[in-house]
Amino acid sequence: MESVDFLKKIEIELKISKNSHYTIRNYISSNKDLLNFLDKYPKEVTPDDVKLFMAEKLQDKAAMSTILFLAAIKYAYVTAFNDDITTGIRRPKKEKKLPITLSKTEVKKLFEELKNQKSKLMASLMYACGFRVSELVNLKIQDLNFPEKIGHVRQSKGNKDRIFNIPEFLTDDLQNQAKNQEGQIYLFTGRSGKLSTRNIQKIIASAAKRAELNGTHCHTLRHSFATHLLEDNVDIRKIQKLLGHSTISTTELYTHISAMQLKKIKSPIDSLI
């Protein structure tokens, strides 16, 4: 089987299985990179070949990158040849890194650096509703129900839908944006049509640099949304639903990064006095 046919077969199977656009893209890219590196037919690839690629190309990558790469190779070879060539290859342990979050003051500082009104509205909406950047660019005008003050995130990560509250503070601006988009499908578009996630990431990264908020990116706004809700004593199970997490364990990560909550804990020695 030629590489082109192999990759096409994997793409078809991924689409049939209703995988997300990002999963399809990443799985195809991982297998393509492996085959280009080895210059072999897919059927000729061995576990040692996979290890060689990992040693040469993934040594400096995060553990999650390696885990995802192996998942992509396993899926492809089990699907095409009923052969898991990653069997016996040890997966690295997932790093337990705490996500970067901003204080409310830092969020305001970031927004102040967004001089373009549309850019500021997009960033505000990501923070106000805990959106992933992909959810923002895929938000359709018809998904907003202004009379009910709710919106719908459709087919997000894990092919899940969820409801979000339209913030009162942003309602007028969002309604104006929807009116300006008359004839369009998506709430936010660019000169050439639908915005890409890369467009938004560049906007946020540039504003963060001017605000001197190192390490800040689009997902930082989502992390900050969850952390600030927790600090405001919102029940963690409600936060789970707002974020669209499948399990509470994912949301519980934020219980470890809320500095405000930690400050409220008094030492037991205080009760001895």
Image (cartoon, rainbow, N blue to C red):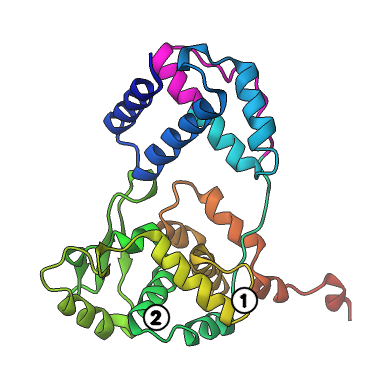
Type of amino acid under label 2: Lys
In this rendering, position of residue 209 left or right of residue 155: right
Type of amino acid under label 1: Leu
Q: Residue at x 59, y 61 (%)?
A: 254
Which of these two is toward me, 206 or 19? 206
In this rendering, position of residue 171 left or right of residue 113: left
| The C terminus - image quarter | bottom right
Q: Which residue is mark 2?
A: 120
Q: Secondary structure at mark 1?
A: loop
Residue 80 at least partly seen:
yes
Image x and y of residue 119, in percent: 38, 77
Q: Residue at x 35, y 84 (%)?
A: 117
Q: Which residues are magenta?
A: 73-93
Q: Which residue is mark 1?
A: 213
Is residue 198 found inside the magenta-colored segment of the image? no
In this rendering, position of residue 200 left or right of residue 175: right
